[in-house]
Each structure stands twice: as C-alpha cells, then as structure tokens.
Amino acid sequence: MQYHVVLTERCNLSRGYCGGTRHVEGIPLEVSYDVGDLANFISHDPEAVIGFYGGEPLPAVDKMYEIMDRVPAKASTLQTNGTRLDEVDPGYLNRLDAPHDTRAGDPRRAHEEAHEGGGASA
C-alpha cells in the first residue's frame, strides 16, 4: 500500500498552491505525531511505499530524513516543486525510488506560470 505523508502544508512559492493541499483550520501545519507511532503502524505492511508530499515537503526535509531512517518501507517517493531539491542530502535523494516529481526546466518559473491567479502563500 502507498502511504501519503504530508510533511508540511506550507508552500514556499508566492502562489498558494503547491502539492494540492489546502490548510484546514485545526489541522497542524507540520507533522505533530511521533514518528515511532508511524513506524509501528507501517511496519505491519511488508509492501509499504511512502510518498512524501506537502504543500512543499522540502522545507521539512529533516522530518523526511527521520522518517526514511526510522520507518520501514519498500520504497519512498517525493512530490516537490523542485525549488529546494539542491538542498537534499544526495544520500537521501539516491534512496528515493523516484528522485522527484516536478516540471521540466526551471521548476519555480514553470510552477508560477502554471498557477497564475493562485492565492497568497501559506
């Protein structure tokens, strides 16, 4: 089974849309549960795949590292707008099944152009 882990609902672009999430009042913007609880839950699934999402997940890259180190998974993926991909430790980037899912070319410009008229950033 694939588990979607929203690392943060924050967006690092001027437009309000990043990964398709919209913040709902009362839901934490950042991961607030114990990663050990997540590890325990997912450990019962030998076919687990973890997909890291957000807002834009890479401002919470340290939480992604912690989850990759502590949670057993067959594979991990990352959906990102690509603007902070150069900040990801290459060792972790190489462990991702698909290094990133982003637009070709300049990801910041492509993302901004694709979402003209979007709301303010979170």
Image: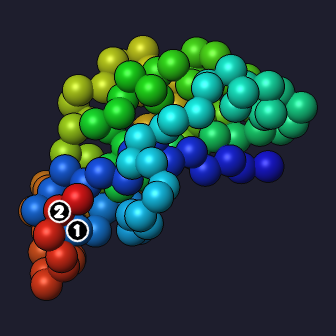
Judged from the image, the secondary structure of the residue bearing numbered disc 1 is: loop
For the residue marked with disc 2, what is the amino acid? Ser
**Left or right side of 86 for 93:** right
Near-viewer residue (41 or 100): 41
Near-viewer residue (74 or 11): 11
Judged from the image, the secondary structure of the residue bearing numbered disc 2 is: loop
* 115 to 61, vertically: above or below: below
At which x and y percent is residue 83? 19, 45
The local crowd at label 2, few if under 14, some if 14 to 19, many if 20 or more residues have their Cα within 10 Å, is some
For the residue marked with disc 1, what is the amino acid? Gly
**Left or right side of 112 for 50:** right
Quadrant housing residue 115: bottom left
At which x and y percent is residue 91? 42, 15
Q: Residue furthest bottom?
A: 117
Q: Which quadrant: the C terminus? A: bottom left
- Give the residue displayed 77% in from the left and 38% down from the top: 48
Q: Give the spatial CA distance, label 2 vs label 1.
A: 4 Å
* 92 to 29, vertically: above or below: above
State the mark number for residue 121: 2
State the mark number for residue 39: none
* 48 to 21, vertically: above or below: above
- Give the residue displayed 68% in from the left and 20% down from the top: 36
At which x and y percent is residue 34? 61, 26
State the mark number for residue 16: 1
**Left or right side of 89 for 3:** right
Dot 2 or dot 1, earlier in sequence:
1
- Give the residue displayed 58% in from the left and 15% down from the top: 69
Near-viewer residue (102 or 36): 36
Labelled pair 2, 1 in contact (Cβ < 8 Å): yes
Q: Does the rendering let one see residue 58?
A: yes
* 94 to 99, vertically: above or below: above
